Amino acid sequence: MLAVGLMSGTSLDGIDAALCEVSSFGDNTKIEERHFHTFPLPKSVKEKIRACAANIPLEPAELTSLNFELGQLFGEAVLKLCKEAHVESQTLAFVASHGQTIFHQPYATEKYLPSTWQMGESAVIAEMCGCPVVSDFRVMDMAAGGQGAPLVPYSEYILYRDNKQNRALQNIGGIGNMTILPANCQLNDIIAFDTGPGNMMIDTAVSFLFNKDYDEGGVLAAQGKLIPELQNDLMRHPYLAQEIPKTTGREVFGSQFTKEILSRFEQESPYDIVATLTWFTAYCISYHYETFISSRLLLDQLIVGGGGSHNHTLLAFLSQLMPQTEVLIQEDLGYSSDAKEAVAFVILGNETMQRRPSNVASATGARKHVVLGKIQYV
């Protein structure tokens, strides 16, 4: 059967849409990517999302409208993808939509309960596309005591586990997240957590300093030198000391945090700042491996996906910091770095349609395995 996975992440690069052929379920799942496209988000929508992530109040009318506007954008992405692939959207078994994270509060505070909000009204998508939509994947895991993240480890277990190699899947989107797959592992053997910033801080700095959306290929970072004082400041960030499992987001490493750094180091070369922030993303990955994983197992391969896999300077830093581990990208294994998370949601949506659990409790901290997502029928 055919299904579409939708992902709009914290990097706000756009809406990733993957058309896949999927069969069976669980360990027997077979999936083939048929078509993929990334559709841009309007600038006005990005600004509203960033305001929400920074906890800047928006009027209830603005929030309600944004939910439906995102639903329309997601629906349009499905329709355009299907048109490109010469497929009628009504023939899809389902659309699996992660939605756009507006705010993610994984821990209780004096003021807030653990909670999360992914926008993009599923009823709008279902009506536009004429097929069922699975959405809101995070909330059931949080209801069961988990952090609602990371979600992709189940799909990584299905696609990447190996009988002989100890593998880690490292996604570098806006935030970085790592999934550890020990050789010949079972689902409960998986370790997964967010490593910290992925492209988020780099993109903010590049936008502010160079008026570009991102550092294409890591070319800007390659022209800079590391700033020791900034390195030391970043290495003391409290997120690094937190025990796993853990998760983070734009609320911690977003534009407000990065702009404070840019203000403090405004006398430094812009190239050096971008180089140091790029190094920090790689350092967070290596730090978490060395601190929390290396005593349990030695990694044979680190397989990088997401937008960060195109940043050659970032990959070079990773290779320097993790010399005993082979650093690969998705394409080295015949997969797509850009489509990886959209494909993952097809796998998760398929489990939901079968009424099967797909959270990895050892990764999220949930009390039990639960069925993720809500289904909007047509």
Image: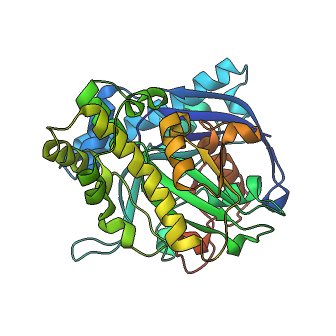
Q: Report which quarter residue 367 is drawn in.
A: bottom right
Q: Position of residue 44 (x, y in %)?
A: 28, 29
Q: Nearer the viewer, residue 214 or 109?
A: 214
Residue at x 48%, y 37% (from the top left corner): 313
Q: Nearer the viewer, residue 53 or 352?
A: 53
- Residue 94 located left or right of residue 144: right
- Residue 178 located left or right of residue 219: right
Most extreme residue toward the bottom is 367
- Residue 271 located left or right of residue 17: left
**Image: 365 above or below 169:** below
Q: Nearer the viewer, residue 347 or 95?
A: 347
Q: Report which quarter residue 87 is drawn in.
A: top right
Quadrant location, the C terminus = top right
**Image: 100 above or below 373:** above
Q: Position of residue 19 (x, y in %)?
A: 69, 33
Residue at x 64%, y 64% (from the top left corner): 180
